[in-house]
Amino acid sequence: MNTLFDPRQVRRAFSRASASYASAAKLQIEIEARLLESLDYYAEGREGEAQTPSLVVDLGCGPGHASRAIQQRWPKAQVLALDLAMPMLRQHDVETSAFARALPRPLARMLARAPARVCADARALPLADHSVDLLFSNLCLQWVEDLPAVFAGFRRVLKPGGMLVVSTFGPDTLYELRSAFAEADAIPHVSPFASIAQFGDALIASGFRNPVLDRDDLVTRYDDLPALMRELRAIGATNALQARRHTLTGKTRFATAANAYENFRDVGRLPATWEIISALAWAPEHGAPIREGGNDVARFPASGIPVRRRVG
């Protein structure tokens, strides 16, 4: 069966980036901070009563920044930090030590219960049915091509009424880079990310209720194309498409792409656009239908969702 992504290349790229990710992933940390704010909705409860999760999963956890923040928020909860790349999980000891040293001693003692690390694939979660209260995932799902299938897996492991909080990249992400390399050759260099409508439809098709979706455009800037490419390698965001070129791009093609990218230069630097899609949804009760009377139980007006544009 032909697939869009090469999961082995995804694992290799993030394994290689494990030591550099924490210092290079400034944009990812910014998006993560916003996503962590959404956990207030879980704490408040659907009926307005405060609640605390027993089991939280941080899927695609990387070096564990969000996992530690979640554990700090709910010290008595069991937090599972899941990632496809084992070297990312090994970085948790390094990052956790630095994190604990920066905390006041009482807070450091509260974090004695560290998140448990699990090497696992988002497409086949090794978790029991209806065992998870809260599933958190920051910028992981852009590497998954079958969103309905992975959301069905999320629904399986979430308890009825459990909450899903996720973010991913949208189709306008790195459109400048995609356009520049299109001038160099016909081989794809940037992934075809799912749109917010496709993302929302996949949530609904999997039975999630009351989805709330949002999108933002963030712009980062670089001195030249090599600087952008170095950052992408440092965070593991390299080309993992099955149809990618399996040899080096070559100096001539790279020079052509770099020259084409110059058409986007603005205020002296090269922009890189990141379309961020975030979503919050609730797992349905046992036996709840996905459709009632031929209509979707939950719908959202994707065309009416505004895009906020921020420049870094």
Image (cartoon, grey):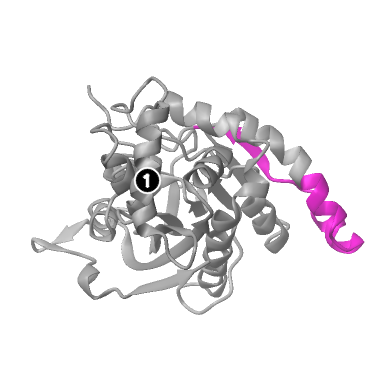
Question: Does the magenta-highlighted stretch encompass residue 138?
Answer: no
Residue 51 spot, x, y in % from top left: 58, 69
Q: Residue at x 55, y 59 (%)?
A: 32
Going by the numbered disc 1, the residue's amino acid type is Asn
- Front one among 267 and 211: 267
User: On the image, numbered disc 1 is attached to which residue?
Assistant: 259
Q: Is 125 displayed left or right of 1 in the figure? A: right
Question: Does the magenta-highlighted stretch encompass residue 97?
Answer: yes
- Front one among 143 and 156: 143
Q: Quadrant of the N terminus?
A: top left
Say if 288 sits above or below 245 in the image.
Answer: below
Say if 140 sits above or below 200 in the image.
Answer: above
Residue 257 spot, x, y in % from top left: 36, 41
- Front one among 225 and 35: 225
Q: Look at the image and give the residue range highlighted in magenta.
A: 96-120
Q: Is residue 85 visible?
A: yes
Q: Where, by quadrant of the figure, is residue 8 drawn?
A: top left
Say if 235 sits above or below 167 in the image.
Answer: above
Q: Is 305 displayed left or right of 279 in the figure? A: left
Residue extending furthest bottom?
Answer: 48
Label 1 crowd bin: few (<14), some (14–19), many (20+), radius 10 Å: some
Q: Is residue 174 visible?
A: no
Question: Secondary structure under badge 1?
Answer: helix
Q: Residue at x 46, y 33 (%)?
A: 121
Q: Residue at x 44, y 56 (%)?
A: 166
Residue 103 spot, x, y in % from top left: 84, 60
Residue extending furthest right?
Answer: 105
